[in-house]
Amino acid sequence: MESNRTSLACLILMMILGVWSENDAPSDKRYAILDNDWLAVGFLPFLLAMKGDMEVLGLVSNTGNTWQKQCGLHALANLEVANLTCIPVYQGATWPLINTPERFQAWETVHGRLPFQGAFGPLNLTAEQTGKNPTSGDPNRVVKEAFVEGFPNTSFNDATSAANFMVEMVHRHPFQVSIFSAGALTNVALAVRIDPSFASLAKELVIMGGYVDVDMFRALGDYGQANINSDINFKMDPEAAKIAINADFPDIIIAGNVANQVQATQEYLDEVYQVKNPLTRLFHDHYGTRFPFWDETAAGVMVDPSIALNTSTVYADVDISYGSASYGDILVYNPELRPAGIRKVTYVNQIDGAKLKEMMKQAMWEPPTC
């Protein structure tokens, strides 16, 4: 309700200032900006969006799985594999708002290690030579050995920054742009701070991340269970996550625990490869079976909300106390017990996994074109 009132107030102000008229009223057309820590097999979120009749305005890179520049180059490479180089890629923030590898590793010394630290993992040049993405060290170095999809021949769009690009697009298409974030939320937070109307002018913010009550999985499960239940997306930049999920987007949809629901299996990889093309080959040979379909789940919910079979509306916040063992974790509250200044989000609890896998398969079998 609070977000709807803000959006209405923003709309009235735009009309008063003469920058908006009834002719600019939102149509049924849907747009998306995909902000992610892209890796070698990262094409499904933008394929799903386009197959769902969303126009992808651009891809944005952030620091998460690895450093922003390496992620951005993976995005360019994935677009080349998909023959979708018409979509621009904008480089996002290289550094989180406050966090650094040294700060992150010091926190781990006190509160325990994460199984996967992304870009903040210890520097390992030997691993990089065998094809691992860069961690720690120089954030602008590029490890070409990690590009199993092929190193890109195209270049970033350097006309503006990622955050400015997002702000410009919501002003150009008010209430029609879905902001998808499946990595650290640094770029989203910067856009929120750059322009007070950014969030309210977007259609929604869709987040992959924000696990709730998974301590027992980490404690009692094997290393793999601990890994998939460790929320690196929020922990990479907790302060940005807090800014983003308390901004006045008309809706914030969080695919947290549910992103672990649909697991990659060899049977599914083989099924997809019944149709052979560059996308299915890359997916079959390099996606692997270690992880669930994280980013794909969030993208599927954005494209087709009907795949969300069960959701909850909760008040949410992020712990930004560096001295806390839950630093970077999402916090959810009873409405009567919530602290001041936080808002409601839509938390997805269950999805139609069979429908998601069918959407993914069709996106690879009959990929969209520019």
Image (cartoon, rainbow, N blue to C red):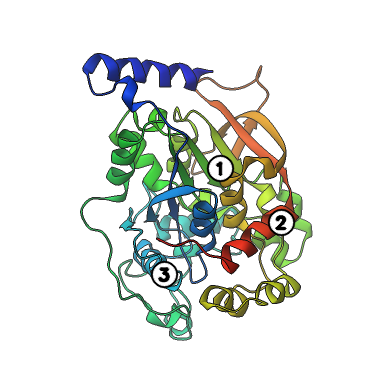
Name the kind of residue labelled 1 in the image.
Ser
Task: Tell me the residue at 71%/48% (across/down).
Answer: 214
Q: Where is residue 361 in the image (x, y as percent from the top left)?
A: 64, 64
- Which SS class for mark 3? loop
> Distance from label 1 to label 3 (Cα)?
46 Å
Nearer the camera: disc 3 or disc 2: 3
Nearer the camera: disc 2 or disc 1: 2
Q: Along the polypeptide, which appears first: circle 3 or circle 2?
A: 3
Lateral position of residue 241 relative to residue 215, left or right? left
2 and 1 marks in contact (CB < 8 Å): no
Residue in front for this viewpoint, 98 or 37: 37
- Which SS class for mark 1? loop
Q: Mark 2 points at which residue?
A: 218
Q: Position of residue 354 (x, y in %)?
A: 75, 56
Which corner quadrant holds the C terminus? Answer: bottom left
Label 2: few (<14), some (14–19) or many (≥20) C-alpha neighbours in 10 Å: some
Q: Name the residue under label 1.
A: 324
Label 3: few (<14), some (14–19) or many (≥20) C-alpha neighbours in 10 Å: some
Q: Where is residue 360 in the image (x, y as percent from the top left)?
A: 62, 61
Task: Tell me the residue at 34%/65% (across/down).
Answer: 69
Which corner quadrant holds the N terminus? Answer: top right
Residue 329 seen from this side: no
Residue 301 seen from this side: yes
Label 1: few (<14), some (14–19) or many (≥20) C-alpha neighbours in 10 Å: few
Q: Where is residue 108 in the image (x, y as percent from the top left)?
A: 54, 57
> Distance from label 3 to label 2 (Cα)?
40 Å
> Distance from label 2 to label 1 (Cα)?
17 Å
- Which SS class for mark 2? helix
Numbered badge on residue 83:
3
